[in-house]
Image: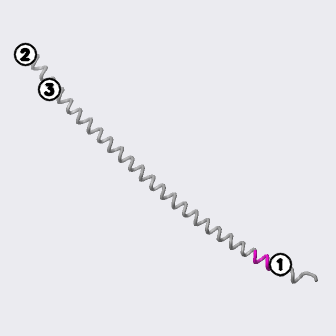
């Protein structure tokens, strides 16, 4: 075998080994990128859950405040009706006959 043939075979062997290493590195990088994507998606889903929980708490609080406001308005209306009845009674008693 000539020196050129020996060098050619050595070069081919080195190229083949480099190809194997490149393949493994590509697979590793693809796996790492996939893992990072999965983690980002999981993080995004968790953030959406927190946001929904916060929104639900705000909605519950708004409903509670609305119920309290409606009760207060109802009590005010009842007090105004009683005052109206008291005024009618006072007018009837003090009206000239």
Q: Secondary structure at mark 2?
A: loop
> For the point 68% across and 71% down, which residue is it?
74
Q: Residues within 10 Å of mark 1 (few under 14, many from 20)?
A: few
CB-based contact (under 8 Å), mark 1 and mark 3: no
Above/below status of 59 relative to 94? above
According to the picture, the residue beneath numbered tag 1 turns out to be: 88
Quadrant of the rendered structure where residue 83 is? bottom right
- Mark 2 surroundings within 10 Å by alpha-carbon count, few (fewer than 14), some (14 through 19), many (20 or more): few
Residue, disc 3: 13
Of mark 1 and mark 3, the one earlier in the sequence is: 3
Measuring 73% from the left and 75% from the top, which residue is drawn there?
79
State which quarter of the image contains the N terminus: top left
Residue 2 has which mark? 2
The x, y position of residue 33, in whole percent, is 32, 41
Against 47, residue 31 (above or below) is above
Residue positioned most to the right? 97
**Residue 17 horizontal side relative to residue 3, left or right:** right
| x and y percentages locating residue 14 in the rendered image | 16, 27
User: Which of the numbered marks, if any, corresponds to residue 18?
Assistant: none
Is the Cβ of the residue at disc 1 closer than 8 Å to that at disc 2?
A: no
Q: Give the CA separation, mark 1 to mark 3.
A: 112 Å
Q: CA distance from mark 2 to mark 3?
A: 17 Å
Question: Where residue 71 appears, x then y in whole percent?
Answer: 65, 71
Q: Position of residue 91 (x, y in %)?
A: 86, 79
Residue 9's quadrant in the figure? Answer: top left
Query: Which is more N-terminal, label 3 or label 2?
Result: 2
Magenta residues, as a range?
Answer: 81-88
* Quadrant, the C terminus: bottom right
Q: Quadrant of residue 75?
A: bottom right
- Separation (CA) of disc 1 from disc 2: 127 Å
Q: Residue at x 11, y 16 (%)?
A: 4
């Amino acid at each position: 075998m000539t020196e050129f043939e020996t060098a050619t075979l050595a070069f081919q062997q080195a190229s083949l080994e480099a190809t194997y290493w490149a393949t493994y590195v590509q697979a590793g990088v693809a796996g790492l990128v996939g893992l990072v994507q999965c983690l980002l998606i999981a993080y995004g889903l968790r953030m959406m859950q927190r946001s929904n929980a916060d929104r639900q708490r705000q909605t519950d609080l708004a409903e509670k405040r609305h119920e309290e406001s409606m009760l207060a308005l109802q009590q005010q209306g009842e007090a105004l009706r009683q005052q109206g009845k008291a005024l009618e009674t006072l007018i009837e008693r003090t009206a000239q006959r």
